Image (spheres, helix red, strand yellow):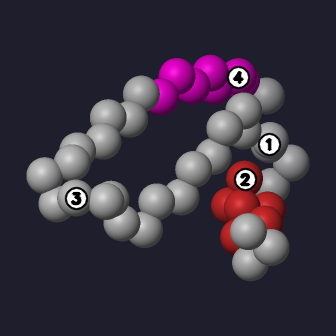
């Protein structure tokens, strides 16, 4: 986990995501994942 924090900081900067998950491998090859994303872009 300590190795991941600097990478997240470089990627997201001051933005703090509500949840971040990193999965290197699923337990079984037949397993699938679903990703749902909601984003809000504000104009400057």
Distance from Cα at disc 4 to Cα at disc 2 = 15 Å
| Picture quadrant of residue 24 | bottom left
Which tag is nearer the camera, tag 4 or tag 1? 1
Quickly name the residue at label 4: 42
Report the residue at 73% width, 68% height from top. Answer: 1
- Asked whether disc 3 touches disc 2, contact meaning CB atoms under 8 Å apart, the reply is no
- Label 1, label 2: how far apart the Cα atoms are: 5 Å
Nearest the camera: 30 or 44?
30
Return the residue nearer the eye: 23 or 14. 23
Q: In which quadrant is the C terminus drawn?
A: top right
Query: Callout 4: helix, strand or loop?
Result: loop
Cα–Cα span, label 3 and label 2: 31 Å
Instruction: Decide if residue 2 is on the left or right side of residue 35.
Output: right
Residue that carries the numbered disc 1 in the rendered image:
15
> Nearer the viewer's eye, disc 3 or disc 2?
3
- Quadrant of the image occupied by residue 33: top left
Spatial distance from mark 4 to mark 1, Cα to Cα?
Answer: 13 Å
Residue 29 x, y percent position in the rendering: 16, 60
Tell me which corner region of the image, top left, top right, bottom left or bottom right, holds residue 18.
top right
The span from disc 1 to disc 3 (Cα, nearest Å) is 33 Å
Residue 11 in the image, given as x and y percentages of width and height: 68, 61
N-terminal label among 4 and 3: 3
Q: Which mark is residue 28?
A: 3
Q: Are marks 4 and 1 in contact (CB under 8 Å)?
A: no
Which is more N-terminal, label 2 or label 3? 2
* Span of residues in magenta: 37-43
Check contact, mark 4 vs mark 3: CB within 8 A: no
Circle 2 Cα neighbour tier, 10 Å, few/some/many (<14 / 14–19 / ≥20): few
Residue drawn at x 32%, y 35% is: 34
Mark 1, residues whose alpha carbon is within 10 Å: few (<14), some, or many (≥20)? few
Element type where label 1 sits in the image: loop
């Amino acid at each position: 986990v300590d190795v991941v924090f600097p990478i997240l900081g470089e990627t997201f900067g001051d933005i703090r995501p509500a949840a971040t998950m990193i999965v290197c491998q699923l337990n079984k090859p037949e397993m699938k994942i679903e990703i749902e994303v909601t984003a809000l872009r504000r104009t400057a």
